[in-house]
Image (spheres, rainbow, N blue to C red):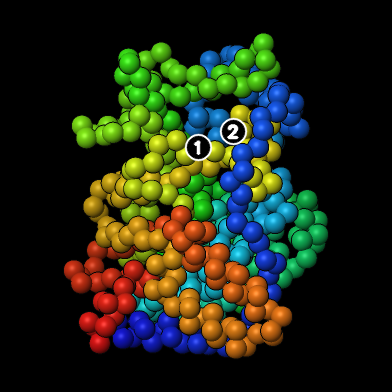
Amino acid sequence: MMQSARKTCIYRIIHGGFKYQNVTTLRCLSVKQTKHPTSTTSNVDLVRHLRARIKSNGPLTIAEYMKEVLTNPLSGYYMKRDVFGSQGDFTTSPEISQMFGELVGIWCLNEWMHVDLTKTLQVVELGPGRGTLADDMLRAISRFSDVRDSVSLHLVEVSPALSDIQESKLSGKKLEQIQAEAATRSSDTVSEGGHYKQCLSKYGQPVYWYQSLQDVPHGLSCFIAHEFLDALPIHKFQKTDRGWCEVLISYDDDSSSFKLVLSPGATVASTAFLQVSPSETRDHIEVCPDAGLIVQELCKRILSHQGFALLADYGHSAEKTDTFRAFKNHQLHDVLVDPGTADLTADVDFTYLRNMTEATVSTYGPLTQQEFLHNMGIGVRLQVLLQKADQEAWKDLISGYDMLTNPKKMGERFKFLALMNPRQKDYIPAGFVTPEALKQSQ
C-alpha cells in the first residue's frame, strides 16, 4: 500500500468521531525505594513452598523464583487479583489514555491493509492486563464497517482473575455475573479450538482466551505484546574473578529471609544462554530465554501467514545491567521481601530479541514511545478529542498525553519493535515512518 493510502487510513481514525472515554488520572511510578522489612510476609503459603524447594534442591535461579512468585497457581501475584491502576501496584499506558489503544488499533489496521483486507484477521494480545488495550483497539477497528466483522480477538492469559476482568471490559457484562458463571465451569475445560473461554465483544467480534501462544490457532495475525515480555522469567549472571557466575536465590534460616548468592561455577543456564562478546563491558547480564522463544514462535507464524507483530515495553539495547526489581503500591520494593505481593520485572533487551529473529523476518525499531505515538498522530488525535470533550475532561486528556509522550515520563523509557514478513526494501510500517520520510513520499 502506498504511503499516501496509509496516511488516509490513519487520518480517518485520528480525525474520526470517537468520543472522549473518561478515565481516572493516573500517576507515574514512583522511584522511591522502600525500606527492607524483616521476614514477615502476608503470603505464607508461597514462602513455605519456596523454602521447601530450596531445601530440597538447592538455590533457585532468578527465573524459577520469578515464575513461582508471579504465576504459581495458588499464590502467584497475577493469579488472584487486579494488580493494575491507581489501586494496584503499577499503571500501564492503555490505562492512562484511550489514545494509546486507538493508535495501536490503527497500526494493526494499516498493516492488515498492506497484506490483504480480504483475509480474516486474528488480533492476538499476549498478557492483556485488564483488557483496556484490546477494548480500545476493537473500538478503533470497528469504526471501519467493511472490515470489523472480519476480525477476531485472541487473548493469551494464564490468570483466571484477570481473564474475568478482561471479559467484563470487552463484553460489557458485570464482573460479578462473569465470576458467578465461571464458578460453575471446570477450570480444566479446554475446547477443541484450544481456548478455555470465549465471549462476544460489545463491538460484535468473537473473543477467545488461551493458556499459551502455542494454543492460538494459526492464521493471519496481528500480535501485540505490551508490557508482557518484562514479566517473563530472566536469568542473571555476574562477572567474578572466577568467571561468569549465575545469581541465585537461597534462604537464610538465621535471619528468616531470602538472599542472593552466586553459583560456584558454570550452571546449566550459563552454558545454554550466556553469550558474551569479546567487546562486552558489563559485569552483569540478564537473559530472558522465554522471550526469545516467544519471538521465534512469532517469526514462524509471521512467515507462514504473512502476519505482523508489535512489541512494546520498557527496555534497552544491550547496555543495561541490573534491572531486576519489584513494584508494590507504585513504589520500588525489595524483590526478596513478601514474595507474591509485588510485581517482579526486568527491562527487555531489544538487541537480544532482534538477534533471536535470526534475520528471518524484517524488524523495525526499537523506537521510543514518544516517537511512535507522534508518528501515529497522537498530537492531532488529542486536538480532536479536546474539541469533542467537555472542558472538565481537558485536564485528563492533556495529562494523559503528557504522561505517554514526555521524555521524562513514559516517552523515552518505553520502546516499540515491529516484526514483519519480509517486504520490499523501502517499506516502513506505520508509526516507524518519520515525518521526513512522509514528505519524500508525497
Please state the horizontal and vertical placement of residue 406, each as a whole percent of the image.
49, 64
Cβ atoms at labels 1 and 2 below 8 Å apart? yes
Disc nearer the start of the sequence (1/2): 1
Instruction: Give the residue at mark 1.
Output: 324
Q: Quadrant of the N terminus?
A: bottom left
Q: Quadrant of the C terminus?
A: bottom left
Please state the horizontal and vertical placement of residue 361, each as a whole percent of the image.
27, 57
In the image, is 203 to the left or to the right of 152? Answer: right
Do we see residue 229 in this rendering?
A: yes
Do we see residue 133 in this rendering?
A: no
Against 338, residue 227 (above or below) is below
User: Could you tell me the amino acid type at mark 1?
Assistant: Phe
Please state the horizontal and vertical placement of residue 354, each as a whole percent of the image.
30, 50
Against 441, residue 425 (above or below) is above
Nearest the eye: 231 or 440: 440
The crowd level at tag 1 (other Cα within 10 Å; few <14, some 14-19, many 20+) is some
Question: What residue lies at 43% left-to-right and 30% top-to-bottom?
Answer: 236
Q: Which mark is residue 335?
A: 2
In the image, is 40 to the left or to the right of 311? Answer: right
Q: Residue furthest left?
A: 425
SS of the residue under disc 1: loop
SS of the residue under disc 2: loop
- The CA span between labels 1 and 2 is 8 Å
Question: What residue lies at 36% left-to-right and 73% top-to-bottom?
Answer: 430
Location of residue 368 by image quarter: bottom left
